[in-house]
């Protein structure tokens, strides 16, 4: 808590309250606190401050440290704790953290508030802003609202601060920095200065004006030793859940990956694969373990969920659920491109800094080929086609265990046919009856069945003949968008 004490002393020296700092002594009205969080978060974005603060125990006029009787831990609204009540009534991009400290033997409470990003922070669906030292409705100040939105368009979650006012030793204690150099295949520098140099260059750290360091959300989410150490990203830890059967009736185990995404990526993949059915085969006189799902598909799907999630969403994170017949990978945020065109469309990243660094660390390619690899590897295993479901504020990818052609639903067959045609098209080829039979592992005797499937996929508007005048025996097909 030493950095908080130093912060309090610095802020208490301000000549007056600012748009991003509010002092209170004992005020404990929950609605006022909620309005102030909205106002301070929006003001921090407007005035290009990464954090705003509300501090109890400092006299509003003199800035003398007086102490407070306010205790956020015991404050309740009905049966609900203050923190949870605020979290429910604030918009989902509100990031805030209460801390209790003692300064000069007097109890204080520090409320650290992350600046608004991507959109304004609202309380009870109303936007607030600080005008001088007063909290006002943002709609009453249209010029400020225009300026604020201009700032928000240029704000990214990755560049916000997860922890501030850190000594070099504190930074190195919080981050798994050796993993960064391992992933880059680079030697570990001999001293702290060399390590900090690279972390600063990557945007994992920022050096503050007071000579101390801040860890960015980018650094925390990728290299935290424990995500729980960072309030802004701890809810974004990957959860892995295994169920006994095909539904959620009986859970077998649940595991939360507490490491940063980059430093913990291989470990999380190993854990997921340990839950999947596997068999041993002998190849070239060597015994080899083969899982029911392609490792490449599992890797790419989980990687995509981490990289393309909506980091602005609070209270939720990516989840992997393992059932007896499928794997479901869900992440907050809807895709930025039409999922029907996900194979051929150029990539579009919601989190550009995150995607760029993970590419340099060889965890992803950032070339838009991830979904192609997922579909291709599922075809090679002759599995049902992977599926994407888009909901109001999340997306789910499902990988299915093996089913014979006869066991697949018609919907699964049509989806596989369309994806196969799309893959062929991006490779400069066209689908035909023979290539689709091979995709399903069927013999030539199944030609008539495949012809009916092709016709059904055409009727669904997903494919069309490449050359309608070609003889039926030599007919080739392309996706509807080709």
Image: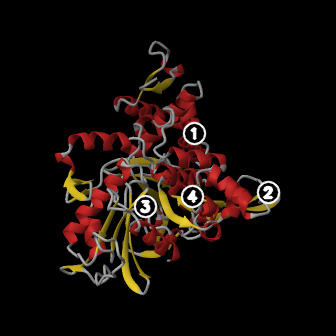
Q: Distance between the residues labelled 2 and 1?
A: 30 Å
Quarter of the image for residue 55 reads bottom left
| Discs 3, 1 touching: Cβ within 8 Å | no
Marks 2 and 1 close (CB-CB < 8 Å): no
Describe residue 51's horizontal placement relative to residue 40 as left or right: right
Choose the circle earlier in sequence order: 2 or 1: 2
> Can you see residue 320?
no
Circle 3 residues within 10 Å: few <14, some 14–19, many ≥20: many
Q: Position of residue 99 (x, y in %)?
A: 40, 76
The image shows residue 480, relative to residue 231, as above or below, that is above
> On screen, 7 above or below 76?
above
Q: Give the mark toward the camera: 2 or 1.
A: 2
Q: Distance between the residues labelled 3 and 4?
A: 17 Å
Q: Name the residue under label 4.
A: 219
**Front of the two marks 4 and 1:** 4
Task: Name the mark on residue 317.
Answer: 3
Task: Name the residue carrying label 1.
Answer: 369
The percent coordinates of residue 368 (x first, y second) are: 55, 38
């Amino acid at each position: 808590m030493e950095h908080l004490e130093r912060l309090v002393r610095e802020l208490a020296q301000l000549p007056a309250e600012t748009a991003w700092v509010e002092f209170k002594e004992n005020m404990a009205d929950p609605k006022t606190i909620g309005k102030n969080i909205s106002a301070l978060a929006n003001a921090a974005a407007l005035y290009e401050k990464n954090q705003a603060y509300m501090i109890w125990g400092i006299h509003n006029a003199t800035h003398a440290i007086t102490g407070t009787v306010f205790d956020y831990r015991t404050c309740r609204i009905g049966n609900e704790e203050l923190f949870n009540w605020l979290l429910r009534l604030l918009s989902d991009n509100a990031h805030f953290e209460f801390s209790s400290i003692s300064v000069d033997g007097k109890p204080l409470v520090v409320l650290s508030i992350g600046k608004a990003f991507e959109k304004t922070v609202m309380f009870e669906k109303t936007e607030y802003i600080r005008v001088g030292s007063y909290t006002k409705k943002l709609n009453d100040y249209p010029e400020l609202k225009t300026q604020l939105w201009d700032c928000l368009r240029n704000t990214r979650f990755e560049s916000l601060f997860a922890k501030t006012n850190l000594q070099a030793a504190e930074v190195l204690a919080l981050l798994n920095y050796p993993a960064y150099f391992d992933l880059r295949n680079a030697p570990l520098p001999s001293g702290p200065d060399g390590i900090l140099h690279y972390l600063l260059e990557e945007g994992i750290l920022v050096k503050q004006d007071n000579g101390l360091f801040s860890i960015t959300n980018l650094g925390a989410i990728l290299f935290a030793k424990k995500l729980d150490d960072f309030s802004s990203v701890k809810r974004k830890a990957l959860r892995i859940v295994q169920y006994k059967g095909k539904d959620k009736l009986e859970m077998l185990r649940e595991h939360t990956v507490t490491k940063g995404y980059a430093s913990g990526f291989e470990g999380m993949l190993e854990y997921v694969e340990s839950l999947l059915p596997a068999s041993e085969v002998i190849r070239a006189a060597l015994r080899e373990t083969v899982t029911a799902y392609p490792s490449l598909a599992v890797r790419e799907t989980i990687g995509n969920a981490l990289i393309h999630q909506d980091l602005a969403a609070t209270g939720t994170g990516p989840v992997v659920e393992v059932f007896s017949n499928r794997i479901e990978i869900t992440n907050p945020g809807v895709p930025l491109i039409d999922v029907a065109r996900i194979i051929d469309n150029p990539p579009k990243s919601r989190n550009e800094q995150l995607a760029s660094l993970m590419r340099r660390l060889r965890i992803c390619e950032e070339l838009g080929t991830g979904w192609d690899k997922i579909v291709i590897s599922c075809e090679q295993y002759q599995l049902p086609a992977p599926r994407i479901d888009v909901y109001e504020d999340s997306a789910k990818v499902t990988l299915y265990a093996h089913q014979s052609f006869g066991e697949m639903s018609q919907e699964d067959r049509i989806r596989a046919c369309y994806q196969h045609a799309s893959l062929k098209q991006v490779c400069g080829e066209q689908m035909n009856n023979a290539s689709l039979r091979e995709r399903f592992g069927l013999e030539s005797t199944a030609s008539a069945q495949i012809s009916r499937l092709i016709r059904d996929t055409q009727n669904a508007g997903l494919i069309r003949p490449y050359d309608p005048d070609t003889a039926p025996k030599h007919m080739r097909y392309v996706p509807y968008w080709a």
